[in-house]
Amino acid sequence: MTGVSAESLPLVARAAQFAERTAIVMGDRQFSYHDLLEKSGRVAASLLARGSDLREARVAFAVPPGFEHVVVQWGIWRAGGIAVPLAIMHPPAEWSYVLQDAKVAIAIASDTFYDGLLPAATELGLDCRSSESLYEFPGGNYLPQIEASRRAMILYTSGTTSKPKGVVSTHDMIAAQIQSLINAWAWTERDRILHCLPLHHIHGIINVLCCALWSGAACEFLLRFDVDEVWRRFLHSEDLTVFMAVPTIYSQLIQAWQKFKEKEQQAATAACQKFRLMVSGSAALPVEVLEHWRLITGHTLLERYGMTEIGMALSNPLHGERRPGHVGTPLPGVELRLVAEDGHVPEMGSPGEIQVRGGTVFKEYWQRPEATRSAFTEGGWFRTGDIGECHDGHIRILGRSSVDIIKTGGYKVSALEIEATLRVHPLITQCAVVGLDDLQWGQLVCAAVELQPGCDLDLQELRYWGKERLAPYKVPSRLEVVQSLPRNAMGKVVKPKVLELFSDA
Ligand code: AMP
């Protein structure tokens, strides 16, 4: 047996209480909490074969979603290392950047990714291991005591202007993020969640996976998001109770539902009744998507707001009014304030930067002391860079100050607000609004749109339509029709890339 030390990580220690319960489901295969403890103990022991504690050594891993991924994550933590999950859909060139920036000591890959990771790891002189070899390690080591203040994870966030930065959180920050959500959304061991999100991002790691495992609930994995497979699981996985996704996933599920035959639609709608909670986040949830989803499933999506650096900060309530277009009130343990440009609290309904403080906020940007310093105020508030407005205590997000707040002709306009209006246009299926620097206007409102198949739209028509619904300075003055908007692995539109669509003219 492995893991003979008293377990010092709460997430792992709690697993012993649920030993015989199902932790992970992958198709027909089920793994218990006992399996998770046993295999992750082996991984830890293997990583410790030449020492007694990884002492915050960075361990990067490229392992697909599922039991093996979790086993490696826990193994790294139990051996005292810092987990650096790699985005499995990224090319090796992007892995190289992370391996170098995080100064990774050990790189782990499953069979599928080993050949891709090996050259990058070898070039940097890293110890590259196959995950399969770790699970089979005989074990027997004492596992180290891990103090809660130890660094646990580095997640890379794509910067809008600079290279991705590593966001470092400690074990106690992760525990605080998990507990806040468990408390707010009433997770219990009777829950079962369908997991279809990437595992290099906070949404999939904390909100879905870690919350489920902390609670003794079951986490049912899909290898990747696939709209038909999600509907199939909704229909056939009996015990699902919770689902969490980004808005684009809900849009795709809606589109798929619309193509079902009437009987299938009825069955799909009925299948949604077994859920107790469906959550949307990581990007603004268009009100039409919320309404459409409510129409076909009866669920009012719970929209929440968060970011890699702060975990989740705002949420609509589990019970009570969920306000469309709003992200609710601060979650348990989160201190949050709005700060206007003049440094004061803005008046009710006026914009200000969202600033957050508390145990859920990250420790630092990895090896970037200057970036870390400038991200916090003197009072220790993290400047999110997101702009919000408060309406009777409920926050509405206007977007990121760097890309979504457009200054045009002396006005400040929210790209998110214009996008919400454009989405009502009968030909527009998706859109992204950006501000292009302009000598005369400061910035020009530019819209990139995806259209219904076979349709066309020109700027004049759009402006004519827009003027009836938007103040004149909010109506786009440039239009690009695109096949598909540039999106990242989370399905979020990458605004700097949208801007490039306009900047050549
Ligand atoms: P990430 O660190 O990748 O999770 O991205 C965090 C960013 O996503 C935040 O800073 C916001 O700009 C945006 N975001 C997250 N949730 C929401 C939401 N519910 N509405 C609008 N923007 C959101």
Image: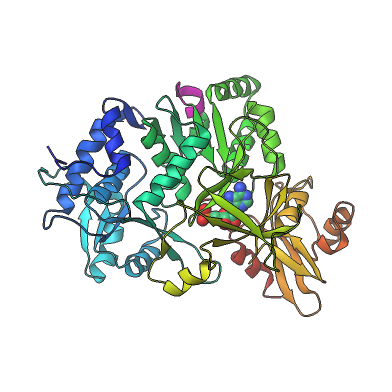
Which of the two residues, 245 or 359, is positioned nearer the viewer here?
359
Seen in the image, is 406 located left or right of residue 498? right
Q: Position of residue 283 (x, y in %)?
A: 60, 50
Residue 150 spot, x, y in % from top left = 30, 56
State which region is magenta. Answer: 232-240
Residue at image point 48% right, 33% down: 229
Q: Is residue 498 above or below residue 61?
A: below
Frontmost residue, 105 versus 213 = 213
Across and down, in percent, residue 147 comes to 27, 52
- Residue closest to the eye, 163 or 407: 407
Instruction: Identify the colour scheme used.
Output: rainbow
Q: Nearer the viewer, residue 200 or 109?
A: 200
Residue 340 can be seen, yes or no:
yes
Q: Residue furthest bottom?
A: 439
* Residue drawn at x 61%, y 29% as measured from the top left: 319
Name above or below for residue 87 compared with residue 3. Answer: below
Position of the N terminus by quadrant: top left
At a point 52% along the width and 42% down the height, the residue shown is: 332
Asked if residue 65 lies in the magenta stretch, the reply is no
